[in-house]
Amino acid sequence: MLYELATAGEQTAAEIGRRLDMDKAHLSRIVARLRTGRLVESRTDPAHARRDLLSLTPAGRRAFAGLEAGTTAQLDTMLVPLAGSERGQLVDAMQAIKRLLDGGERKEPAVILRRPRPGDLGWVIHRQAELYHQEYDWDWTYEGLVATILGDFTAHFDPEREDAWIAELDGRVVGSIFLMKSDKPEVGKLRLLYVDPSARGHGLGKRLVRACIERARELGYAALTLWTNDILTAARRIYQAEGFQLVAENQHRSFGQDLVGQTWTLDLKGLTQKEREPQLLSSPDLSPTG
């Protein structure tokens, strides 16, 4: 009751009861106790003579301030052991819970693709290595590979031939893709496509791949190639839907596992995505890809 009056201001007992879903008799007893303690006062509603408007007295505001300070102190005690990144994860989780339990009209989450900022590449390395270990039991050598790829990319970045995108969902970083040069001037590389499990189902994988394809066309590449592994089936469906063709396979031992590597190529001089759209196969979104 004190919280509702402190945060929402003057209102009737009935309004508070509806908001808190309280029994009328129980609500009446609480109001009576707060009045007796001189924490709450009332006045007749000028617009409706039969209604009383409740508000906090100075003593009630002091009581609420003390309760609020105690709550804040308890939260501080809980949060002190958490690092800054962990606090961010906690906030993200609380926002996700709120969205899922919200009984009102649900809005589509805001999805954006943007260029990398400081800290993003470290996130890409960490999340890809962590998820690939969880889902495919790849060892730490994969993390070293991704770190090497991105280290070379930043050290020798060519804005006239390369690009990168970070995906955000409701302000959270949830995906990435990179367009890189190859040893052939006319061929670009699609690398490190990733969509976080929490963001699957929003079409991010397809959007990232299409952004890379269109940018490669803009930069004048004749073809786009990528390397992945056959166990990443959902990602491969996206490549197939976008027109990539499987051109080579090889068995290899990497990241502590026996794998089948695949090379896929897209002819950028052929039909554009818009021209091919009616022929696209539907595909689920998305497992991560190497």
Image (cartoon, rainbow, N blue to C red):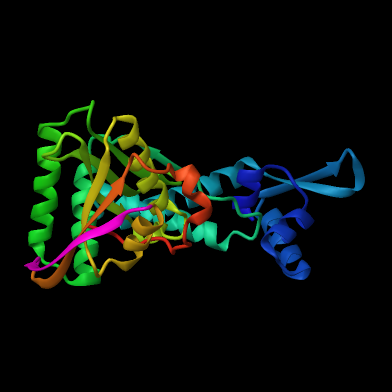
Which residue sits at x=24%, y=63%? 131
Q: Is residue 172 visible?
A: no
**Residue 104 at what x, y percent from top left?**
66, 56
In the rendered view, does 271 fall on the left or right side of 109?
left
16 or 222, nearer to the observer: 222
217 or 5, nearer to the observer: 217
Q: Is residue 87 above or below residue 10?
A: below
Main structural element of the magenta stretch: helix, strand or loop? Answer: strand
**Residue 275 at what x, y percent from top left?**
49, 44
In the rendered view, does 63 fall on the left or right side of 79?
right
Q: Which image quadrant: the N terminus?
A: bottom right
**Residue 48 at what x, y percent from top left?**
91, 44
The residue most toward the right is: 49
Q: Is residue 208 above or below residue 181?
A: below
236 or 200, nearer to the observer: 236
Corner quadrant of residue 128 = bottom left
Corner quadrant of residue 263 = bottom left
Q: Is residue 187 above or below residue 17?
A: above
Q: Which region shows up in magenta?
A: 243-255
98 or 179, nearer to the observer: 179
Q: How many marks?
A: 0
In the rendered view, does 231 fall on the left or right side of 214?
left
Which residue sits at x=32%, y=58%? 78
- Asked if the stretch drawn in magenta spans residue 253, the answer is yes
Q: Is residue 290 visible?
A: yes
The residue most toward the top is: 160
**Residue 226 at what x, y percent from top left?**
23, 51
Which residue sits at x=22%, y=30%? 161
Which residue sits at x=65%, y=48%? 5
Q: Which image quadrant: the C terminus?
A: bottom left
- Asked if the stretch drawn in magenta spans residue 56, the answer is no
